[in-house]
Amino acid sequence: MMYTVRPVSNSILEFFALPGSLDRADQRVDEIVGSNDTADRKVRYGRWSAHPETRMTLLGFNAFGNALASPLGVVPIVIPSVTRELPESSDSWKIGARITRSIGKLNLGLGYIWGFNPQAADMVFKVKRTRCVAGAPPLCSPAPGVFTPTVADVRLVNDRTHIFAGHFNYTVEQLLGIPFNTAIRGEVAFYPNKPYNISSFPGAFGLRAGPHPKHPDGTTDKHTLRYAIGFDKSVLIPFLQEDPWRTFVLSFQLFQSIILDHEDGIRPFSTVEKIKPVSTTLTFRIGTGYFGDTILPDLFLSYDPEGYWAANPALSYVPPGNEKIKISLVGALYGGRNKFKSLGLFDEKDSVFLKMRYQF
Amino acid sequence: MSFPSSTLPSVVSRSRRLPALALFLLFLLLQAPKSQGADADLKPGETIGPNNWQRVQGMVGENLLNRIKAGYTFQIKEPKIYKPIKEYVEATEKYSGKVRLGSNGELLNYVAGQPFPKVDPNDPQIGQKLAWNFFYRWLGDDYKTGGAVKGGKIIRAAIEKDGAERRADLVSYFLFPSTRYTLDPKPVIPGYEHIDFMQLRIDSYPRDASGTTTLEIRYKDPQRPDDLYIYIPSIRRIRRATTTQRCQTLAPSEFNLDDINSFNGKITDFNYKYLGDKKILANISQEHLPFGRKQGDYLPLDEKWEVVDTYVLEITPKDPSYCYPKKVLHLNKVTLDTHWTLIWDKRGEYWKEQFGFFTPVKLHDGREAWSVGDVVIVNVQNGRSTIVTATRTYNQGYPASMWSLATLQSIMRGGSIE
């Protein structure tokens, strides 16, 4: 439900309360309850069910850690296996408010949400305990010369989150008397005490990371600021166009995430790659249409200053006699080799593919 | 005024590059066929075709005339007479007495109705006054474009030179919050005095574009650009856009932002010249929506044309970089809507030709009004054309809050407008 108060001025005040699946939401946050499981035969989804990596199972239980288990060796293994506790999603409701106002050409807004942050990449797990499959810590050795995996039981940090947010957009028609035709926009969000996983780098036994002495449960809270600033611009480049009045549409964005009072060792839960105090991504897109928009070139570029990049050139064809068909030749190129970080995740997966879309 | 409407302005444009004597001789040459050309004394029931195209020369655009020469045949019908909307006439009588033009062509003391009901051909400001009369013509208090089309949506067909067609469906909602004649509050919704109109447009077909929603706001302040917000479903974001790039082609159509309703530019951004009165061929009582036509062609095959009295208004931009150095409108003397729009490019060559049919529609109280029916724009240089069937339903009583960012946000969350 959403309640909106719209005075006749240029202000919009919105209050919203978005209930979770209160009727029957006793599935875990990552589960899908299928139609065969419910009396009303409806499919329900947990908050994070869209993210398949949280549904990885092996031998009937959540075995995300098992899938990543290190081979057994002559020395005890610190965390070869993880079992995770995921809460029920029944109270996923959120409340918030936002005020938006236009002052001349400037449109800006401030908002607040109290709820769960639904970004899978933001999941943080707290260590409950460590145990052995057999034997006892720290060696997990049930018999001389025999070692079994250590199991870490972790619990999802699922506290409600406050998010303070703002946005603005502003159009610049002219700059120094020259047509500029640009819309500038920005978004900002502040997350107080946002949880992160943290480890000590390097870890024992040659591992890249190990338990952090200051944070035995493997988590820490940091104020975090995230923002994006960018522009959208349409520009005429007559010498590149058969129709001199068909614009090229440009879009640029800068994303930054800033961890205030940063500590060394902060990392995502799933990998042992440090998160720096400031993470930056730049994106740029340009697209236009030729021959009555039957030929549609498009280029998307993304760059992470830590050395990762992606380029997605695409050329689409819409037959002039059938608006339902679109044939696209798309390239997906990535750079920066690190399968656990940023765009490096996709490195070695460069591809060029042809796709056809028919719209019913 | 029987010169070919599409020829004279072209000559005038080129005249800047020609010596005066050559221009004069050229003018005389072009005047020669006029005595054998347009004949406003066309009789209902008369058939026009390749054998007697001279009968309508100068009453239609050059491109359509060429199509007639090549075989297009149609009948002349009895002219349709619309009765002006009573409330609009009353507002004109009540408010027009105090309306003046400012030094930059802006409108002063305007409240509602037709700003300048008395048109004097000898008035040196008649062009500017006609432009304001056109801008503030009766358009209802609000309307849904496409509301009176079967299916309730605007149907747009983009036709390639070889006849291949692509279709798109959309709806648009207009609100005129400061010039209201029928719905309360009148004549202005409190708080909206500074706004001329607001438009909400939603694309619905094809699926690639479905859900794309734009909100456009036109302010009275001559210095203030329009606001334009676009909700883009693929990124689930509302984006701001500038509206000063008004010349950009709205591909795959041949329209641009300022071609909407024939001329949608900001009145104070242009100069206006009255070229005289003229009888032209139009269709203001379209019978079939959309009209019958051959696939891949824009010619109406099951419609008759009628003779209509118009004012001819030449529009030239104050900004020399503007895409249309010259646009000529033919304004209906009763409804002030445009029937023919002729456009030249910067080389002075004929570029686009637009004709709009109108059709009778009923208001809620049963009275007859008029609405645009089918509109055709032809790019005579690249051979592409676009047909839009966009008949309106007026005075729906939409709340002004519908034209707000909250509506875009509501659509973003899966809501719908109606």
Image: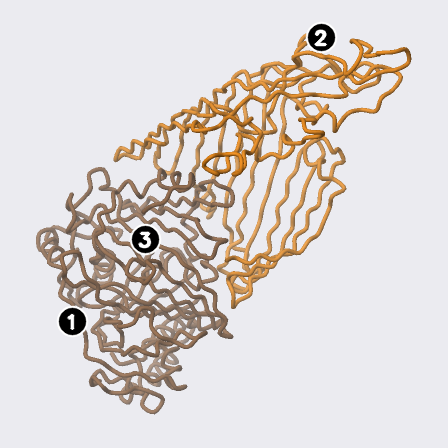
Chain colours: A orange, B brown
Does residue B386 appear to the left or right of A348 in the view shown?
A: left
Parent chain of label 2: A
Q: Which amino acid does label 1 sit on?
A: Ile
Parent chain of label 3: B
Give the CA distance from mark 1 to mark 3: 30 Å
Q: What x and y, as percent, mark residue A152?
A: 71, 16
| Residue A174, quarter of picture | top left
Please tell me how crowded label 3 is: few (under 14), some (14-19), or many (20+) other residues with Cα within 10 Å: some
According to the image, label 1 marks what residue?
B81
Q: Name the one closer to the observer, A279 or A60.
A: A60
Image quarter hosting the N terminus of chain A: top left
According to the image, label 2 marks what residue?
A213
According to the image, label 3 marks what residue?
B266
Q: What x and y, as percent, mark residue B383?
A: 47, 73
Please tell me how crowded label 1 is: few (under 14), some (14-19), or many (20+) other residues with Cα within 10 Å: few
Give the CA distance from mark 2 to mark 3: 68 Å
Dot 1 or dot 3: first in sequence order is 1
